[in-house]
Amino acid sequence: MEIELASGAPADLYPCIGATRGLVIVPDMLGRRPLYNEMAESMATTRAWNVIVIEPFRRREFATSGTEERHALMPEMNDDDVVGDMVDAANRLEVEPVGLVGFCMGGMYSFKASASHRFDRIVSFYGMIRLPEHWKGPNQREPLALLKHSDNHQSILAIVGTEDHYTPPNDVDDLEKTGVQVVRYEGADHGFVHDPSRPAYRPGDAADAWSRAYAHLVAR
């Protein structure tokens, strides 16, 4: 069901009676859509989790369904707003502990949200480790800088492809040096796990990555 966060941002909530954990999902650049509704509903029913999907762009209206307008908006984004919505979403789940999963842009914000200390386990699927140059703005901080404030880097799992220009090898090496757990998939490009409609999708690697992600989220 759709709910409204304190900021006015919409979110999709999937509760489960007797839930054993909560999970916040932060989508990619294209935001909430059926792909994430199906993902969240499946997690709620098969994992017995309370799951919520947030909209990173709040109630912004876009003229097209593509990414061009969204890329152009990135310098105006505010870390405190996005992470604040993520924390608010976690509090709406009414269960502890709460994990966090983000994809692409959402994976970048998942790195940033580690500084909030709200999430016990984090999985970032191909999140940007350094801000792309054309995304830089006054209220956008570097993911690596915020990761320094995490109180448990081992609680963060980064899943990356070796052919992803958003996660170049030097950035991945620097991420690993912080203590974050990194799994590299040889030959994989950006977005190879979460969306079967993407040309980059690799079903074998996707299945392995999801297996690792679920194991990480419930590890103690």
Image (cartoon, grey):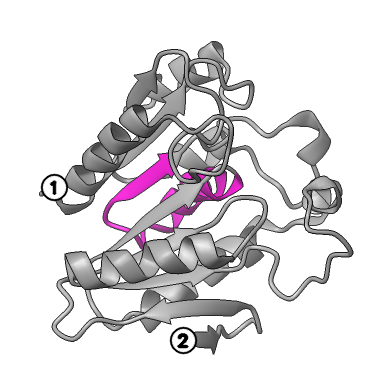
Q: Do labels 2 and 1 touch, CB within 8 Å? A: no
Name the residue: 71% across, 58% down: 78
Residue 36 as seen in the image, left or right of residue 57: left
When asked about the image quadrant of residue 100, the answer is bottom left
Residue 9 as seen in the image, left or right of residue 3: right
**Callout 1: SS:** loop
- The amino acid at mark 1 is Ala
- Out of 195 and 140, give the one closest to the viewer: 195
Residue 62 as seen in the image, left or right of residue 47: right
Q: Which residue is mark 2?
A: 1
- The amino acid at mark 2 is Met
Name the residue: 62% across, 27% down: 166
- Out of 81 and 214, give the one closest to the viewer: 214
- Per the rendered image, the range of residues in magenta is 105-124
Residue 76 as seen in the image, left or right of residue 176: right
Name the residue: 24% across, 78% down: 95
**Callout 2: SS:** loop
Q: Is residue 86 above or below residue 76?
A: below
Nearest-to-viewer mark from 2 and 1: 2
Q: Which residue is mark 1?
A: 219
When asked about the image quadrant of residue 141, the answer is top right
Prevailing secondary structure class for the magenta stretch in the rendered image:
helix
Query: Can you give x and y, in whole percent of width and height, for residue 118 in the image?
Result: 36, 63
Query: Can you give x and y, in whole percent of width and height, for residue 43 in the image?
Result: 28, 64
Residue 123 is inside the magenta segment = yes
- How many C-alpha atoms fall within 10 Å of the one at disc 1: few (<14), some, or many (≥20)? few
Name the residue: 45% across, 45% down: 194
Query: Can you give x and y, in whole percent of width and height, for residue 102 in the image?
Result: 47, 50
Q: CA distance from mark 2 to mark 1?
A: 29 Å
